[in-house]
Amino acid sequence: MIDRTVCVDRPKFKLSLLSIGHFFNDLYAAFLPTFVPTLISRLGITMAQAGLLNSVVGIIHIFLQPLLGYVSDRTARSYLVMIGPILTCLGATFLPSSPTYGMALFLVGLWGVGSATFHPQGHGGVGHVVPQEKLTVSLAIFSVAGNIGVTISPLFAVALAKIVGVEKIPYIAIVPVLILAIAIYRYMPVLSEEAAEFPKNQGGLFHSLFSVLGVIYPVWMVSMARDATSQGIRFFLPIRIVSEGGNISMVGTILFLIMLCSTIAMLISGKLSDRWGKVRVLIFVLIAGPICMIPAAYIGGKTSIILYILGTSFLNSSMPITAAVAQEQVPHSRGMASSIVMGLSWGVANLLTGPLGKLGDVFGITSTMLVVAALPLLALPMVFMKSFRSAE
């Protein structure tokens, strides 16, 4: 039997539990892009209505993540990282069999609450369980774990649907997150034994939110542009593939390749950041991503898919960089910082899928893909502001 006293004091063990939680949370949270063509066909909804499903998640993250980031900065208890993946699993896995659009909205909301519950404490908790000198690489490991979940999600979702049917997916999927919650409760009931790491007198929620945002808003804007493009490609590319004659298996395979390459790119960017500096690597990927994806909007076939895979991978490789910069700027508000650059930005990005879907309904999917691809260029000037200069 594993000795609890020894395990809870091991940074690598704690990081492993947080990373496994990130893996399962994002594994289930990424179900929607795989099944959105099916939902459009079965429920008879438009691209704008499909985009609204993603926008609901965005609204939840915008309002809930800062609150839960505030809570996570004031408690060492691990309740949020236990509960979050369970709620995400329930909402995301019941969604494919939703009988009505209204029920689909409710289930997406449940998934959004679960994901918003996990991420502030999970991401911010990394900074509490590892030594400061290992923060960037530890955040890369945590991010890669989530990306691996997103990577295999489409293949996993399609396989489950074929093997057990969409109606039985939730009963299979819930098992590992329940086991994980028990393991966290047993071996990591608190993220840190040092109460000083969780200061109590930082003002109220809005004081904490705006004081942190006032420092890291350039990082947030870069993260928001990146997430809007990444989410937009993952959401609308399946619709384009199906409209060109593809099927759900093809969609799952392409989404798998996008996230697999993104995961590899994260590891590479972490190494390059240590050698060349965070800002230089960030500037490169913010330019390289759109260079690949803008022409991809106008062409079709395999070349277009390859360009989307490359472009999305470039952009997603910046996730550990922006997360590390944000936490380094406000080390006593790691949960709030994480909720802003990983949650609030992701929420706003999801919120944009509704208007982008309407753009596709009116002007066509090519217009939507073009706008999505160009967004990171709008955030490029933010990289030259103080928050990033001090990161070098």
Image: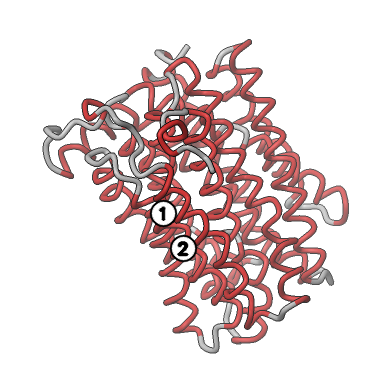
Q: Is residue 132 visible?
A: yes
Instruction: Report the residue at 60% width, 48% height from top.
Output: 230
Amino acid at circle 1: Met
Q: Disc 2 marks which amino acid?
A: Ile
| Residue at (57, 71) in percent of width and height | 93
Going by the image, does 1 lie left or right of 203? right
Q: Where in the figure is residue 295, as x and y percent of width and height?
A: 75, 44
Rendered position, 352 above or below 53: above
Outermost residue toward the front in this view: 1
Q: Is residue 78 left or right of residue 228?
A: left
Identify the mark at residue 86; answer none if there is no mark: 2
Residue occupying image coordinates x 73% and y 65%: 240
Task: Identify residue for label 1.
Answer: 82
Could you say which is closer to the camera, residue 268 or residue 72?
72
Residue 371's x, y, as percent?
A: 59, 51
Query: Which residue occupies the foreground of this view, 55 or 202?
Result: 202
